[in-house]
Image: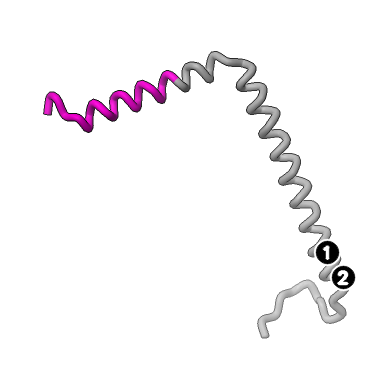
Amino acid sequence: MANNPRNNANKKLKHHRNQDSDDFDSNPEAWATLDKNFKQVQSVLDRNRMLIQQVNDNHQSKNPNNNGHHKEG
């Protein structure tokens, strides 16, 4: 098992992954971009959550038989 091709491939992949991680860790601009993008995505998700809640509230207010509980028919 000293010269297992699978182990060698895994070592190379791990080394490559670690090298990429080191490059990213040492790049503050990449972190700033990632942070900015995550904030933008979170803003969109928050807005979508609010819109869904408004639609649900609107739907409930238009249902004359609505007592706040879901009844299976």
Residue behind mark 2: 61
Q: CA gap, disc 2 to disc 1?
A: 6 Å
Considering every residue shown, the one lying at the far left of the view is 1
Residue behind mark 1: 57
Corner quadrant of residue 3: top left
Q: Amino acid at mark 1?
A: Asp
Residue range in magenta is 1-19
User: Where in the figure is residue 27, as x and y percent of width and height?
Assistant: 58, 15
Corner quadrant of residue 16: top left
User: Where in the figure is residue 51, as x and y percent of width and height?
Assistant: 80, 54
Q: Is residue 12 left or right of residue 29?
A: left
Task: In the rendered view, tell whether residue 17 sits above or below residue 66.
Answer: above
Q: Is residue 22 covered in magenta?
A: no
- Residue at horizontal 83%, vertical 64%? 57
| Quadrant in the picture for the C terminus | bottom right
- Mark 2–mark 1 CB contact (< 8 Å): yes
Q: Is residue 29 left or right of residue 2?
A: right
User: Where in the figure is residue 39, as x and y percent of width and height?
Assistant: 71, 34
Considering every residue shown, the one lying at the far top of the view is 26
Q: Is residue 24 left or right of residue 64?
A: left
Residue 62 or 23: which is nearer the viewer? 23
Q: Amino acid at mark 2?
A: Ser
Corner quadrant of residue 6: top left
- Residue at horizontal 61%, vertical 21%? 30
Secondary structure type for disc 2: helix
Characterize the local packing of mark 2: few (<14), some (14-19) or many (20 or more) Cα atoms within 10 angstroms.
few
